[in-house]
Each structure stands twice: as C-alpha cells, then as structure tokens.
Image (cartoon, rainbow, N blue to C red):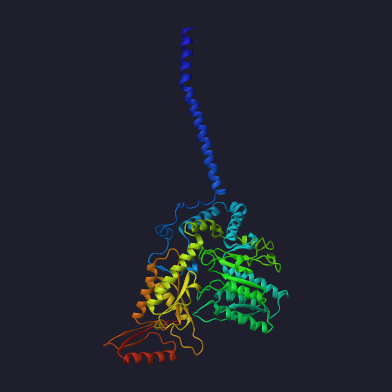
Amino acid sequence: MAEKIIMFCRYYVLLIVLLPYRTLQFFYHKLSFQVSRASNLDAAEGIENHVPIEPKLSSSFITDSEIQSEFAHHAPGVARMNNGSFGCCPASVISALQQWQLKLLCQPDHFYFNELEDRILESRYKIKDLINAEDVDEVSIVDNISTAVAIVLQQAAWAFAEGKFNKGDAVIMFHCAYGAVKNSIKAYFSRAGGYVIEVQFNFPLNSNEEIISEFSKALEREKGNGRRVRLAVIDHVTCMPSVIMPVKQLVKICREEGVEQVFIDAAHGVGCVDVDMQEIGADFYASTLYKWFFCPPAAAFLYCRKSATYSDLQLHHPVVSHRYGMGLAEESFWVGTRDYSPYLVLPSAMEFVKRFKGGVEGIIKMNHDAVVEMGKMLAEAWGTNLGCPPDMCASMIMIGLPSCLGISSDDDTMKLWAHLREKFGVEVRIHYQAPKDGEVVLTTGYVRICHQIYNKVDDYYKLRDTINQLVHDGFTCALEVYILPSSTLSVCKLEQQRHTTHCNFLNLVCLLFIDLGFYVSLQLNEA
C-alpha cells in the first residue's frame, strides 16, 4: 500500500511539473501553426492580391541629393537635355514597374482576368482628376500619341467611306506638326479623299498673335473657297521648333468658323504645361505620361469629350481585339497580350510628384524658369537669340546656333545632333529653319534644350563649351569641314569623290583657302 502511495505521489508530482510545459508546448505549436499558416496565406495573397509597395517617402519635400539618387541610373558623363523626346523615370517608379511586371509573370491568369481592369480603371480616374475631365468614360489609356492620332483619324477615314464626309473635305494643321502625325493624316485622311490645309508661321516668333493671325486667315480663305473643314489638328506644345501654342484661342476660332472637331496633340502636355479640359474645350486631347510625368514608356491617354454629335462607340482602337464595340475605353483596356505595367504605375508617379513643393504645378514652374535662364545664358554666350519670348516656352526653349556652323539642311541637323551625342556626350535636338525665298538670315540652326528636375547647370555649360569649341576649331556642319591656319602646309584632301560637280566646287573652295595659307581637311559623308 505504501508503495502504491509513493508511486501515485511520484506521478502526481511529475504531472504537476510536466503539465504546464506540455500546455505551453501545445499552445506554442498551435500559435506557430497559425503564424505559419498566416504567412503562407500572405505569400499566396502576394501572388493574388499584392499591390506594389509604394516607396517610403519623407514627410518633407524632396532634396537635391534624393533627386540625384532617383536618377542615378542615368548614364554618367552624359548631359541629358533632351527630356522632351523620351522623358525620364525615377527609381521609385521603376521599382513599382518591376513589381507589376513580376506580378504578371507570377500568375498571368489571375493578373489579366482578376486585377488588370481594376488597376487600369484606377489610373483612368487619376487622369480624369489630373486634367479636370467631367467623366472617367472620357479617358482612355493608350501607349502613345501615334495610337491616339490613329484612333481619331481612323474615325475620319470611315466617315469618308460611309459617305458622311465628302471628297475634298479638309483637315487643318500647322506646318510644324509632328512628322508621325503628318504621316497618319496622309495614311488615313488624304488616302480617303480628304484635303490637307497646312498653316505656316514665321520662326523666330514674337507673339501668339502671329500664330493666331495665320490660322484665322487660312480658315477664312478655305471657307471662302467653299471648303468644309472637318477636323483641326493642333499641338499644345510643338516639337520642333518648340513653342507653346495658344490652344484656347485656336479652339475658339475653330468653333466660330464651323470646324467640326478639334484634336490637340499634347505629347508635351501633362507635366509640361497646365492642362484643363474644361478650359481648353477641345473634342480630343492626347498626352503622354512618360515625357514629363515620370511614367515609363509607353503610357499615354486620349481624352474624348462627350458630345451630342458623336459617341465613343464610333471611335475604335486600331488594334481590334475581344472588346471591340464596347466603347473606346474598353477597347483600349485590352489590345491583346502585352505588358500593361506602364499603365499601372501612374499612382506611384503621382506620389513622386507630391514630393515636390507645389506638386506638378511647382515642377512646371521650376522647369520653365530654369530652361529660360539657361537659354538666355547660351544665347548670350553664342551671340545669338531665343526662338520666341519666354512666355511662349514651356520646359523647352530654342536658341540660335552660331551661323559659322553652317547648318543649311535637315541632314546637317542630324549630323550635328549625332556628332554632339557620340563625340561629346551632349544630348539635344537641332532644328533647321529654312529661309524664305529671297530672305537673307544669319541664323538658320537652332538647338532645343529641355529642363527636367534631374538637370544641373553643368549640363548647359557643357553644351555651351562644346559649341564654342566647335566654332574655335573651325567646324562647319554642312560639310563637316575643319579649317585650320597653317603657315607651312597646303593640302586639300578630298576623302570621297562621289559627286563630281559638288567636289569640283569644293576643290575651288579648298584652293582658295590654300592660297590664303590655310590647311584644309575636308570630310564628306556617304549620305
């Protein structure tokens, strides 16, 4: 009996000692299981419902060092003053882009069928608010301006085909319309039987009145000839030469003169100038989001104002897919399997913009003030002029180049453009302004510089010094000639003799300089 009592006591003591341990162990494992299960669920949701992590932003405004960090991926040693061509994308937005791309690759079925539409709709709502549109249905996201132009002009082509437009009905545009837009007009409008009115204005410009006057005269002239103008295509900011167009006044003139529809090509729109659909009043407005609003290529939008004269059901994306006939926004949402990530990072780009004092308006003002200051500095250094008054410049400005560079054709501009980029690491655009018949002008070449938040003053000093060096070295762009003084050597070297007449003339030029005691080294391109 005593042994049983002792055995019972041993078990009792053991139970008292072990029970708390086992209890804690049980709850520990249960808790671990729950944590593990939650982690697994989170991991699964990371594939299904993960939203890209927004960059950690400081409560204060962005600093200069943070700006340089955001663009540290830019090629070192290159003076990038051509933001207007392809834009820029900060590291925080690139990170969001990569997360969206990874999300697509993780589980395409879920991404395409369960999430993409909502995310694109979110971006459309943000665009609607950004441009002060009345309805989100007026906003369609597309990849670039070329697509937006094709949408509008395709409608016009069908209007000719269906007898709604008559042969000879016109589209009016400016001579400086973007080349791709001109080609689209040729492909859709002219080919269908339309007539193109091309309005010229002088450059350099002194005021908006010069543009408005030429536009009004062209419309009145064609109206007097009995021609019906169906569509006007107007830039908000022209590419080359770069000028802010008086779009509000031009739209008003179109309404007064009976132009049926107005399309604004705003490749340099959002992030470059103030954009308000209610104030502008155009029927169509297309802007990129990658040139001046920090999205990656290629993301843009087309605004189509609600009107009693047409429905968005009459507008179609040029790429026909499963949502054909459901409205332009729906058609644009899905154009087949592709990477839609650039459309989805707009919220991240907007968060980046909020880090700047004044937001997008503050960035626009800062870029404008800086590019005007740099433009004046360059014009003074080269003894030339600005292409237009500062109030007609956005974040880009035109500056006359020294006439001794000899820019006398569009081919010359391409040569100098490539020469500056490849040899000196200077990225700008060059414009040739052809003189009118009988006109004698000293400046026929202009450089377009841009300013974006990553630019430094040293970029513009590098451009200034490079051009000054070319002038000092006797570089002549038209013939790629370096004429150097020499007291001992008289040589005329013609490396290529493809064009006999041209080369005979060059021989005479060379002999003239040789007689004057110069050394002439002349290089002719294949082209």
Q: Which residue is situated farthest in the left direction here?
A: 488
**In the displayed structure, would residue 384 be above or below residue 43?**
below
| Left or right for 430, reference 253 | left
- Res 38 quadrant in image: top right
Residue 118 picture location, percent across and down: 61, 54
**Foreground: 245 or 140?**
245
Is residue 188 in view from this perspective? Answer: no
**In the displayed structure, would residue 31 be above or below residue 85?**
above
Is residue 355 in view from this perspective? Answer: yes
- Residue at 64% x, 84% y is 221
**In the displayed structure, would residue 422 be above or below residue 142?**
below
**Foreground: 245 or 66?**
245
- Residue at 57% x, 71% y is 265
- Res 322 quadrant in image: bottom right
**In the displayed structure, would residue 188 be above or below residue 355?**
below
| Left or right for 337, reference 507 | right
Residue 148 picture location, percent across and down: 60, 68
| Left or right for 489, reference 92 | left
- Residue at 60% x, 57% y is 125
Residue 525 picture location, percent across and down: 42, 81
Residue 262 picture location, percent across and down: 63, 72
